[in-house]
Image (spheres, rainbow, N blue to C red):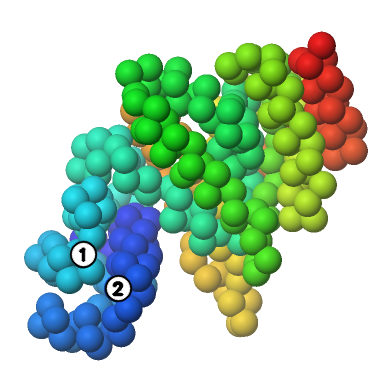
């Protein structure tokens, strides 16, 4: 893999390999010995610091860790995808559609800065809202599959409520996303009450960009999240920040610091045009009451 290539796939591959090893109860030297590689090689794999990844090593590690077929295919795909300064992840191509690449980044983040013009962010979705979204996207899905996807979304939300270093979330919602009925008015009422409640957490900042604010940047922008990983003891970034853009057929990950700065600036513009936190919370509760009538 080129040194100029995206680091996101390598970092995600390393996270999954480390998690699988720990779940298997193995030390790094034990795992390295089982695949007949050096401990340093495995360490570089787990930290995303290697540009030369042998697919055979990944397959053997997945076998040693007893990873299932979806995870194995996902890790094999990650090992192959790092060809440019930004990374376009096609859903269902090298990486299976059921293997969620973004979740690992989200769980490792210290701060998430998001703008949501059309839909409530996954981290803030109430179960019935998620269920309605899944059923619209996958009308042929079984009840078990729907429940599984709802459970995944709910488990992701623990990042906001965990006791040790909960993720900081600073999100702006376009008012239209809150007035768009997903499922039913009952579901929307519960969803907006949930948003208002979540906004009281000390690590969560939610603001509503009212329709009356127009288009603060002059051009419409879609859903995005800037993922920051915090600083180490020397004041250096633990990992490079990433911009996450989700589309119908895949996701784009931008790592250029110019891109990261551009999206932070864009978020700052919509945040300045948005209602303050208290007024936003009041609007959420007002809309929840209106839906409940």
Crowd band around label 1 with a 10 angstrom C-alpha radius: few (<14), some (14–19), many (20+): some
Q: Quadrant of the N terminus?
A: bottom left
| Number of numbered discs | 2
Q: Are marks 1 and 2 in contact (CB under 8 Å)?
A: yes
Disc ID at residue 24: 2
Would residue 218 be visible to someone looking at this image?
no
**x then y, percent, for residue 77:** 21, 50
The structure residue drawn at horizontal position 41% and vertical position 39%, both measured from the top left corner, is 148
Q: Secondary structure at mark 1?
A: loop
**x then y, percent, for residue 65:** 23, 69
**x then y, percent, for residue 223:** 56, 32
Would residue 3 be visible to someone looking at this image?
yes
Q: Secondary structure at mark 2?
A: loop
The structure residue drawn at horizontal position 21% and vertical position 64%, both measured from the top left corner, is 66
In the depicted view, which residue is nearer to us: 254 or 35? 35
Q: Is residue 255 toward the left or the right of residue 92 in the image?
A: right
**Dividing the picture into quarters, in which one does residue 45 lie?**
bottom left
Disc ID at residue 66: 1
**x then y, percent, for residue 134:** 45, 26
Q: Answer with mark 1 or mark 2, whichever residue precedes in sequence.
A: 2
**Residue farthest front in this picture:** 143
Q: Is residue 56 above or below residue 187?
A: below
Q: Is residue 33 toward the left or the right of residue 75 in the image?
A: left
Q: Quadrant of the C terminus?
A: top right
Q: Is residue 174 above or below residue 9?
A: above
The structure residue drawn at horizontal position 79% and vertical position 36%, both measured from the top left corner, is 196
The structure residue drawn at horizontal position 36% and vertical position 74%, both measured from the top left corner, is 22
């Amino acid at each position: 893999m080129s040194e100029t290539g995206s680091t996101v796939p390598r970092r995600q591959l390393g996270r999954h390999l480390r998690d699988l090893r720990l779940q298997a109860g193995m030390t790094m030297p034990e795992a390295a010995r089982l695949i007949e590689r050096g401990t340093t090689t495995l360490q570089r794999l787990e930290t995303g610091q290697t540009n030369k990844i042998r697919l055979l090593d990944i397959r053997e590690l997945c076998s040693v860790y007893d990873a299932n077929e979806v995870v194995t295919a996902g890790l094999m795909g990650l090992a192959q995808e790092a060809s440019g300064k930004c990374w376009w992840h096609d859903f269902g191509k090298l990486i299976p559609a059921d293997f969620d690449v973004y979740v690992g980044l989200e769980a490792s983040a210290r701060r998430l800065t998001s703008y949501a013009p059309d839909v409530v962010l996954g981290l803030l979705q109430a179960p019935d809202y998620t269920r309605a979204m899944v059923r619209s996207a996958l009308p042929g899905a079984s009840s078990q599959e729907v429940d599984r996807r709802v459970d995944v979304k709910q488990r992701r939300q623990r990042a906001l409520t965990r006791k040790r270093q909960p993720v900081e979330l600073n999100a702006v919602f376009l008012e239209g996303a809150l007035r768009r009925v997903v499922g039913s008015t009952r579901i929307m009422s519960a969803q907006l009450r949930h948003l208002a409640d979540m906004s009281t957490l000390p690590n969560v900042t939610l603001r509503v960009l009212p329709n009356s604010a127009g288009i603060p940047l002059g051009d419409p922008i879609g859903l995005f999240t800037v993922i920051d990983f915090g600083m180490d003891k020397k004041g250096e970034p633990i990992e490079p920040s990433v911009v996450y853009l989700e589309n119908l057929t895949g996701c784009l990950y931008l790592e250029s610091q110019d891109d990261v700065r551009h999206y932070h600036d864009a978020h700052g513009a919509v945040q300045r045009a948005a209602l303050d936190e208290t007024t936003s919370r009041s609007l959420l509760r007002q809309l929840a009451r209106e839906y409940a009538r």
